[in-house]
């Protein structure tokens, strides 16, 4: 059975990682694939029935159709929307890349054909004094997908991230140009520059679809084929 696991990271926070991840999961399900989704660490939660719940994790659950319970999908749910290692320290929690990687590997030991693990923020978001979310991606052997938030500064952020992935021994599976705001000057030229310089295929270009857009609207704009080979 084909088993594909990807780690969705981004050039920044609030640039559409969950939007893109959910869209890929939706496409995979439409093709009849058994999907799984995980969000190992989430900072920025609402308290529901006395427990913290993250909206990104909830979207991944809905898009993947997984039968995992919430805590399997999102084992570390932190209430304040701040850097995860700071939120964890304030809550008296020690984050460990090894623990998170083991959790992901155990969860994904079940039968699935297409899985996405979504990070928080960008590639080098700290977990503790020595480890970052990059260590989780590498620890579970997932291939990164880079979501580029198309705004001023994205070229530097995208190229630095791709370089860091390569330096760590990661294999960038592809990238998506996603527009989190209505307009970006020289948009086409920026996309072309990324296409020339990023060492992986472009998996889609998603224009700004509105603040209330559904991941289903983004799905037709994405190419899942390179991820299924």
Image (spheres, rainbow, N blue to C red):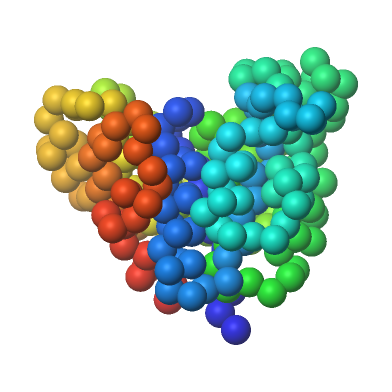
Q: Residue at position x 20%, y 42% from top?
A: 191
Q: Residue at position x 69%, y 74% from top?
A: 111
Classify 110 as above or below 212: below
Q: Position of residue 15 (x, y in %)?
A: 40, 32
Residue 212 in which image quadrant: top left
Q: Position of residue 147 (x, y in %)?
A: 40, 43
Q: Position of residue 193 (x, y in %)?
A: 19, 42
Residue 146 vs residue 20, the one in the foreground = 20
**For residue 128, side relative to residue 151 (left or right):** right
Q: Residue at position x 43%, y 69% from top?
A: 30
**For residue 52, side relative to residue 148 (left or right):** right
**For residue 179, side relative to residue 228 (left or right):** left
Classify 49 as above or below 220: above
Q: Position of residue 41 (x, y in %)?
A: 68, 37
Classify 223 as above or below 136: below
Q: Give the farthest residue toward the bottom.
A: 1
Residue 66 in which image quadrant: bottom right
Image quadrant occupied by the C terminus: bottom left
**For residue 64, side relative to residue 214 (left or right):** right
Residue 160 vs residue 47, the one in the foreground = 47
Q: Give the farthest residue toward the front.
A: 49
Number of marks in the rendered image? 0
Image quadrant occupied by the N terminus: bottom right
């Amino acid at each position: 059975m084909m088993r594909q696991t990807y780690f969705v990271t981004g050039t920044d926070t609030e640039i559409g990682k969950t939007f893109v991840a959910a869209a890929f999961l939706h496409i995979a399900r439409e093709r009849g694939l058994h999907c799984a989704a995980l969000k190992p660490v989430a900072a920025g939660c609402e308290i529901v029935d006395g427990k913290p719940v993250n909206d990104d994790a909830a979207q991944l659950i809905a898009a993947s159709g997984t039968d995992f319970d919430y805590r399997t999908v999102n084992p570390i749910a932190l209430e304040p929307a701040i850097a995860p290692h700071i939120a964890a320290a304030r809550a008296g929690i020690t984050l460990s890349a090894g623990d998170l990687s083991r959790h992901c590997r155990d969860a994904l030991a079940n039968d699935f054909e297409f899985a996405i693990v979504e990070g928080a923020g960008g590639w080098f978001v700290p977990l503790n004094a020595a480890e970052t979310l990059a260590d989780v991606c590498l620890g579970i052997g997932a291939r990164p997908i880079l979501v580029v938030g198309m705004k001023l500064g994205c070229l530097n952020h995208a190229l630095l991230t791709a370089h860091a992935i390569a330096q760590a021994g990661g294999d960038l599976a592809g990238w998506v140009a996603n527009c989190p705001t209505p307009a970006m000057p020289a948009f086409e030229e920026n996309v072309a520059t990324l296409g020339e310089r990023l060492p992986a295929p472009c998996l889609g270009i998603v224009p700004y679809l509105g603040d209330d857009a559904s991941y289903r609207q983004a799905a037709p704009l994405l190419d899942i084929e390179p991820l299924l080979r």
